[in-house]
Image (spheres, rainbow, N blue to C red):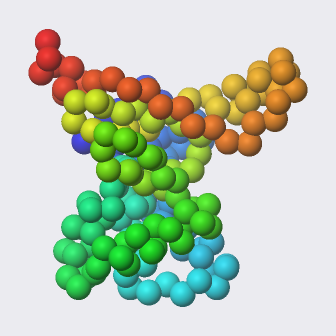
């Protein structure tokens, strides 16, 4: 599901920032170009995992495996984890670690807030003014933030309406 707010898009396929549309194809190109620059071999399995990560909002390893097997039936979970590990090591994706549910992965590397539904486990990105926040922090404290991670936990619109 994609939710569109003024100036913001949340969901699986695309995001909208102040700079314009940021979609899965752009994310996919960024990851592939960086791996090619580092002379990492792009196997069909890796390419499919990158496509899934680029076009799906915060998938877990099992979801990646299920989607990958639609195109590559003999894909193994070890290949999924190995590729995730490689992409994390290269700084091309982030891992969101949880105690209550499967870890999730995201390829959107720009600063944003993760909105995590405690009802259904859905995670959506909410773009915020990260660079402005970093500037204020630096002015007030002298601390130079390089990256950020914010998570809000609550109920998504769908789960919230079920509880009402």
Please state the horizontal and vertical placement of residue 62, each as a whole percent of the image. Answer: 27, 62
Q: Quadrant of residue 44?
A: bottom left
The relative height of residue 78 versus residue 141 in the rendered view (above or below) is: below
Q: Is residue 141 left or right of residue 158?
A: right
In the image, what residue occupies the spot 82% across and 30% down? 143
In the image, what residue occupies the spot 62% across and 72% down? 34
Q: Quadrant of residue 155?
A: top left
In the image, what residue occupies the spot 44% across and 46% down? 97
* Front one among 101 and 68: 101
The relative height of residue 60 versus residue 142 in the rendered view (above or below) is: below
Q: Is residue 67 left or right of residue 38?
A: left
Please state the horizontal and vertical placement of residue 80, each as a whole percent of the image. Answer: 37, 72
Q: Residue furthest top?
A: 164
Task: Please state, as top left, top right, bottom left or bottom right, where the N terminus lies in the image.
Answer: top left
The relative height of residue 11 versus residue 35 in the rendered view (above or below) is: above
* Front one among 20 and 60: 60
Q: Is residue 129 left or right of residue 15?
A: right
């Amino acid at each position: 599901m994609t939710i569109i707010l003024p100036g913001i898009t949340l969901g699986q396929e695309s995001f909208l920032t102040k700079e314009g549309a940021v979609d899965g194809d752009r994310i996919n190109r960024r990851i592939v170009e960086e791996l090619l620059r580092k002379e990492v071999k792009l196997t069909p399995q890796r390419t499919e995992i990158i496509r899934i990560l680029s076009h799906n909002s915060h998938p877990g390893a099992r979801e990646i495996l299920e989607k990958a097997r639609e195109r590559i039936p003999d894909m193994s979970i070890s290949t999924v984890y190995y590729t995730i590990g490689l992409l994390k090591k290269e700084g091309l994706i982030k891992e969101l670690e949880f105690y209550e549910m499967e870890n999730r992965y995201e390829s959107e590397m720009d600063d944003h807030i993760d909105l995590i539904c405690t009802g259904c486990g859905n995670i959506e990105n909410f773009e915020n003014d990260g660079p402005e926040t970093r500037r204020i922090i630096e002015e007030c404290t002298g601390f130079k933030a390089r990256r950020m991670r914010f998570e809000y936990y609550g109920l998504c619109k769908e789960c919230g309406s079920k509880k009402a």
